[in-house]
Amino acid sequence: MKKVFKYILKLFPRPLLIRMSYWVRPLLAFALKGNRYTDPIDGKSFRKFLPYGYEKPRENVLSPSTLSLERHRLLWLYLSRETDFFSKAYKVLHFAPEQAFYQRFRKLQNLNYTTTDLNSPLADVKADICDLPFEDNSFDIILCNHVLEHIPDDKKAMSELFRVLKKGGWGIFQIPQDLNREVTFEDDSITDKKKRAEIFGQYDHVRIYGRDYFQKLTEAGFKVEPLPYASQMSEEEVERFRLAKNEVVPLVHKP
């Protein structure tokens, strides 16, 4: 199974995978239904989740129904349990909208919801994160998850995120992060795609963020609150929802 998913991820471009998934999901959900694991996004339970990953696929992490991964389920739990995201009127900007969230967020009557990306077929606005076509102080909330590791000039991207977020607004900017690494690692001299995938996790990642990621956000102007949210849950919940226990939710505020 791991080899099949690894092959599919490499063979098909992401926009096509997004379109294909609409008819694949119901088949996967039916085949894997059970009671051991639960996707908190839709409440459905399964006997197992699917593997996912490019070079080193992780076992039992991809939900058959929403196609959510550990980070998506953690974010959903945080938003639903700890915020008023689902009830209060907010103007929201969502970068590279994930399928697990897109339709659900779009249907929320309390949100003025805009999606943006350069390539995603789910984007309302095709835009470069380093040169956003929005006015200053436009959005109450920004969700920008697993995007910045793809951006060569992440300082410029962070500056743009800060610019378009309203004063008093907040955001969540998840990234792949090695918390054992103090300093973020980059090396533009590595150009071979296979080698980059081995070192950075994906060939199109340009860095591995370390603990200094939070300082980078602070330097962009944000007040940063790294939340070890999964570690605050019970072992039973972490296992049932298939979360990464040490993952941190990077919550930011614009003073």
Image: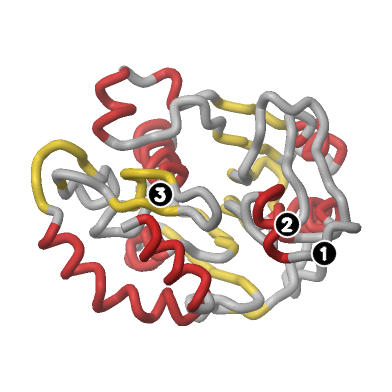
How far is disc 2 from disc 1 in space, using C-alphas? 7 Å
Q: Position of residue 112 (x, y in %)?
A: 48, 65
Residue in the picture at 40% in, 49% down: 69
- Please, is residue 218 above or below residue 71 in the view? above
Q: Are marks 1 and 3 in contact (CB under 8 Å)?
A: no
Amino acid type shown at disc 3: Leu
Q: Please rate how many residues cluster around mark 2, counting C-alpha atoms within 10 Å: few if below 14, some from 14 to 19, many from 20.
A: many
> Residue 164: x, y in percent?
73, 58
Picture quadrant where residue 3 is located: bottom left
Label 3 Cα crowd, 10 Å radius (few <14 / some 14-19 / many 20+): many
**Residue drawn where x is 74% and y is 72% of the image:** 128
Dot 1 lies on which element? loop
The image's colouring method is secondary structure
Residue depicted at x 67% and y 38%: 253
Judge from the rendering whether residue 43 lies leftward or rightward of residue 149; answer left or right: left
Which residue in the protein does label 2 denote? 196
Q: Which mark is residue 191?
A: 1
